[in-house]
Structure formats: C-alpha cells, structure tokens
Amino acid sequence: MAKVLEENTADEVPPLECGHGQISLLMEAITEAVTIRTQTEFVYLNAAARKLFGMADDFRDYASIDHTDIVHPDDYAMQVHYFQRRLAEKEAPSHYEFRVSGGQDPFFWVSCVASTIVWEGKPAVLACITDISSQKKAQQENNRFDRLFRHIFDLVPDVMLLVSLTEGRIVDVNPEFVNVFGKRREDVIGKISADIGIWADGTFLDRFVEELKMTTSMMDVPTTVRTRGNVIRHFQLFAQKIEYGLQPLLLLVGRDVTEDLLQEQELRRRKDDAELANRSKSAFLANMSHELRTPLNGILGFAEIIRDEMIGPIGNARYSEYAQDVHESGTHLLAIINDILDLSKVEAGHMQTHVTWIDPIDCLDTCLSLVRGNATDNGISMIRDLDETIFLEADERLLKQIVINLLSNSVKYTESGGTVTLSFKRTGNAGVCLSVTDTGIGMTPDEVKIARRPFGQVVSRLSKKLEGSGLGLPLVCAFTEKMGGTMTIESQTEVGTRVNIIFPPLKVKEKESDTPEGSDAI
C-alpha cells in the first residue's frame, strides 16, 4: 500500500471514499504505521502508529493529539506546509522525511508517504510512516567517516590516489600527489595511471596489478617514479582494496624513501669503513706489541744485570739506582704492552680461551697473596669471603687476570685504613657472583662510563699519584664476556666501588664433597 501511495501524488490519485469500519480491520493488521488527519484533527492511528508514538494500545482519543507534541520543532513548519498544500489540492512531495517523538523517547527520524483521501465526506491526508532512525544513524556515521577520510586524504604528507578497480581509472588524488608530480588534479582524474607517465619502470604497473589480484593489500612495495621535472625518485608503495559506496576502489599510498636509502647506504659504507679501520688498528697494535716486547725484554734483562752487579761492581752507586729506575719503567711499559696486546686480540677475535671446570678457590687465594703485600704497605685490610663448594667453568688464566686487575685497582684507589673484599657467592638464580668491593674514592655514573672505555681514565685527587693505562676495566669486561659472564659496576663517590663478575647457572656446579665456607680477614 505504501508503495502505491508513494508512486502517486495528491493530484494523480482520485480521493478515496472510506468508512471507519471499512478501513479499521485492514489498517490494524498491517505493520506499517498509518495516520489519517483532517484539516482540524487526527481521526485515526492504527496499532503500529500508536506504538510508534508511544501510546497505549487501546488509545482511541485521536482528536486530543496535539500535532506539535509529535513533530520536531525544526520540522514542524515543513510538515504543516506540505499537509496544507495537499489538502488544498496543490503540488506537494508525496515522500519526505522528518523527526517525531515516541513518547518518552527522544526524537527520531521517520519516512512519510502521504496522499489525499476523503474521510467521512471530508478531505484528509493519509500518511504511511516508517522508522528510519537506524538508517539515518548509519548514514550519519558514514558521512562522518567520509569527512574524516577526506581530511586524512588531504592532509597526509604521503602521495595518495584512489583508482577504480573495475576500470583502472584515477578517481581522486591528494594535494601531495599534485605537489610531487607537478600535475593538476583535473588533468589526472579519469585517466589511467599508466597514461600520465609517473612510473619510471614501464613494466611495474602490470606486475603490481597481477600481484594485487591475489590479495586485498600489499605493503612496502619498492618502485621508482618520475616526479616533477622528470626526476627519478625511490618510493615505497602501500595498497589496499576498499569499498566506497557500491564502487570497489584501490587506495594507493606512496612514500618517498630516496633520502632514507641514501642514508642507509652511507651508514653501511661508514660501518664497513669503521670495521676495516678497527681490524687494521687491532692488527697494527698486535704487531707493534710483539715488536716492542722483544727489545724491551732485552732492556729489562740488562737493567737487572747492572742493578744487581752480576758481572762485577759498577764503582758508583748512582748507576745502580739508575738501573733500578730503568727496570721499573720497563716493567710498567711491558705491562701496558701486554694489556694492549690482550685487548687487540679480543677485538680482532684472536683471543684463545681454554674453558674447563676448575676449582676457583686456589686461583682466588693466589690473587689475594699477590696483592696482599701492596695492600699491607698502604694500610689497607683485605677480606676473603669465598664459597668453597662451587666448581666454575672458566679459563683459569683469564680468571686470574680478572681478579688481579680488580684487586690491584681497588688497592690503588683506596686510602689507608680502608678495606678491599673479595667475594665469591651464589646468586638467587643458581649462578655465581665474583665481586671485588672497596671503600675507596668511588666514581660518579659518568665516570663509570669513562672507566669502561679503553684508555679511559677518571680524573681524581689520586690521579697524579697513580700510574695506569686505562685498560684495566675494559680488559676485565672483555675477558668476562669471553667466558660467558657479565660485568657490572656499582660505585658512589667517597663510599666505594663494587665490581661484579656474574656467571650464569650453566657455568656453575656443586663440588662432590662440600667444605665449609671461609670468611677471614687477611
């Protein structure tokens, strides 16, 4: 019925003579809301209309309905205007939309198909009303997304174009496309992208389309394009099939990655150059260290002969003192050369390790004995705190170098009356921690970073009194990592420093027969 009424205007449909009894049974049965209104009042609402407007099912007092209570104030004038024109047999839309109230509910949208009839001898308007609030909401949501998409499309700094999937023609391009390719929007819309000369590779588009047939989206597709001034640039393409209305479209997004590629190539070149320079430096230091050690051993040997007067008396005691100075300086220089050689071997990947299961206690006690004399001479107490029930998988030579280096550093930077503690204990995760703790001058976080770098030396009030190459901690770190451990440093100025060498559980196992732990002052 609604369809018939929609297809006919008031001028085309002859007035319909109806009695209340004739129409009532028919109208109450249909699910579409129907209202009949004369010039002065409503004369009929079917069950669907009463429900739509929030009325009781048995409501029959139609004359009491105020039209202004039903229709939204902003739509009231339009609705009355159409109603009056229809009653006056003037042209008026047969199909229109407006907002109505459903009792306690807020206003919602309805679609109305109206026609003129005769009700009990009087002209009246019959309206078939359908709730379209859900369609309106969906339309508003679509409009919101359309506006949002347009804002993104216009503002995004990448090149974007929409292409029809059925015809392959350009539907739209964003301002960045116009800027990059130097083509006017109206000159490219409606054309096929292959015809506007933006692809540097003539075969790319065909290959791209063939690949796209097998998927709904494509990411990070490299290509080359001809930009403004016929300049070749490298682009990364992103493609996504989308539905716009009933038209299937392809959204293409292109990002200029030319500068990124150039930077990547430059970084790769610099990395290769740096690695080559580092290998060359390590090889040079290793070779020079060997070349220096040979004559230096001779100098030390002859200095010992002169100092100890092995061949015969010198005749002047000052020559013996000079020989002693030569020997001490040479010994210090030899230690530096050995450190450089070891560090060069590690950096060049030539450091050989002999990792086996060892009982570390003898090794740690030996290190304590070697450093104890210097500590005693400087008024420093040494504390031994070792768990003697642990076997450790390590290189004993490297372990000894690590511990002697750490103990020597701690003694060097701890003033008289202080303590240095060597600890070897299990960690909470079944690993083991070898640590050297002192009550020395300590370091700030920035100074710790300096100390970890090769040849990095921290300036302190003791710096001028002490000799060092700045290779101690870097060597400890390198040796530790070579054996599968990690080194951490905890330090605070005027409080002290703790260096931890941590080995994972796979490097630790229990001795077959436990021995009691020792904690003694030395």
Image (cartoon, rainbow, N blue to C red):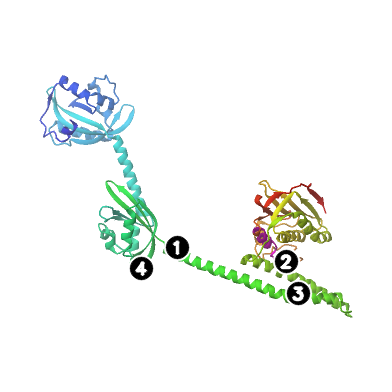
- List x then y, in percent, for residue 321: 84, 75
Q: What element carries label 2?
A: loop
Q: In this view, does 272 lie to the left or right of 475?
A: left
Comes first in the chain, label 2 or label 4: 4
Residue at image mark 1: 260
Give residue 297's mark: 3
* Residue 150 percent across, percent down from the top left: 33, 50
167 and 429: which is toward the camera: 429
Q: Which of marks 2 and 3 is nearer the N terminus?
A: 3
Residue position for label 4: 231
Q: Is residue 123 magenta?
A: no
Element type where label 1 sits in the image? helix
Q: In this view, does 53 lie above or below 377?
A: above
For label 1, the crowd category at 10 Å Cα-Cα, with few meaning under 14, some 14 to 19 and many 20 or more, is: few
What amino acid type should be assigned to the residue bearing mark 3?
Asn
Measure how far apart labels 2 and 3 are at the Cα level. Answer: 20 Å
Label 2 or label 3, whichever lies nearer to me, is 3
Marks 1 and 3, the one that precedes in the sequence? 1
Q: Give the range drawn in magenta.
A: 468-481
